[in-house]
Image (cartoon, coloured by chain):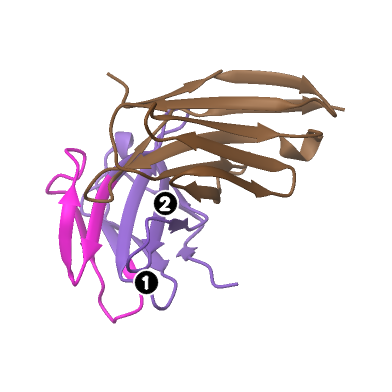
Chain colours: A purple, B brown
């Protein structure tokens, strides 16, 4: 069964460093999402991406964040200069055309020291 | 203001018990996800439903679109069902609103 994969599973970084989180979507899916879950809190929407551009973004997704699909397969989330409060689990999700169901990746746990 | 409300927040059950988790929502369109989050953090989609009822093994999900309410039932609960169960509703832009989750512990 096709699945969404994410790398790395866990990333530890120093405050102020740039991080790139990677997601490999299910091959025929065209809609991509990033979500964040701070420890003990609910999952929050960050951004949606379709046709090589951002469809929608939340207020969390400020100028420190960017997304791209650099090579037609990977879907990346970049945090330019990490802050302590960026420590969270980051989930990628992908969706096919004409359906509402989203498939989630296993998540990347980001720890900012 | 919570667009998606779940109850209960925490639930402890004895193995074999019938479990119900409820979700009410004030936003979103006519579809709803039930997700399962394991202790390690990974999220698995259990159901996506837009009407009526769906069943998968011991899991049953129902939805009433008019009342904006859904329930997730687990029959013959087992310790391996212990997880956080999350209700999520997409808006017109497919952005999901998530509930805070129900933490279920099934005791042997």
The span from disc 2 to disc 1 (Cα, nearest Å) is: 16 Å
What percent of the width, then of the height, locates residue A96?
A: 37, 68
Tell me if residue A75 can be seen.
Answer: yes
What SS does tag 2 mark?
strand
Tell me if residue A87 can be seen.
Answer: no
Which span is picked out in magenta? A46-75
- Name the residue at 60% across, 19% down: B10
Q: Quadrant of residue A27?
A: bottom left
User: Is residue B99 depicted above or below B10 in this figure?
Assistant: below
What percent of the width, then of the height, locates residue A69?
A: 26, 72
Q: Is residue B50 left or right of residue B21?
A: left
- Name the residue at 41% across, 39% down: B88
Chain ID of residue with mark 2 = A
Instruction: Say whether residue A93 is magenta.
Output: no
The residue singled out by tag 1 in the image is A29
Viewer-proximal residue among A41 and A16? A41
First-in-chain label (2 vs 1)? 1
User: Is residue B1 depicted above or below B30 in this figure?
Assistant: above
What SS does tag 1 mark?
loop
The residue singled out by tag 2 in the image is A91
């Amino acid at each position: 069964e096709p699945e969404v994969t994410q790398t790395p599973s866990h990333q530890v970084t120093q405050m102020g460093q740039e991080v790139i989180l990677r997601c490999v979507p299910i091959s025929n899916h065209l809609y991509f999402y990033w979500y964040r879950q701070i420890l003990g809190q609910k999952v929050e929407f960050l951004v949606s991406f379709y046709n090589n551009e951002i469809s929608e973004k939340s207020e969390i997704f400020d100028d420190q964040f960017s997304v791209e699909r650099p090579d037609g397969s990977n879907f990346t989330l970049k945090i330019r200069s990490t802050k302590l409060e960026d420590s969270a689990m980051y989930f990628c999700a992908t969706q096919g055309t004409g359906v509402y169901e989203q498939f989630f990746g296993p998540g990347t746990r980001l720890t900012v020291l | 203001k919570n667009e998606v409300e779940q109850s209960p927040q925490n639930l402890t059950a004895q193995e074999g018990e019938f479990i119900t988790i409820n979700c009410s929502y004030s936003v979103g369109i006519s579809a709803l996800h039930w997700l399962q989050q394991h202790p390690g953090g990974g999220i698995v989609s259990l159901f996506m439903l837009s009407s009526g009822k769906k069943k998968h093994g011991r899991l049953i999900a129902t939805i009433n679109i008019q009342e904006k309410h859904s329930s997730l039932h687990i029959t013959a609960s087992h310790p391996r069902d212990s997880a956080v169960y999350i209700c999520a509703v997409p808006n017109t832009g497919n952005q999901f609103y998530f509930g805070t989750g129900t933490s279920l512990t099934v005791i042997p």
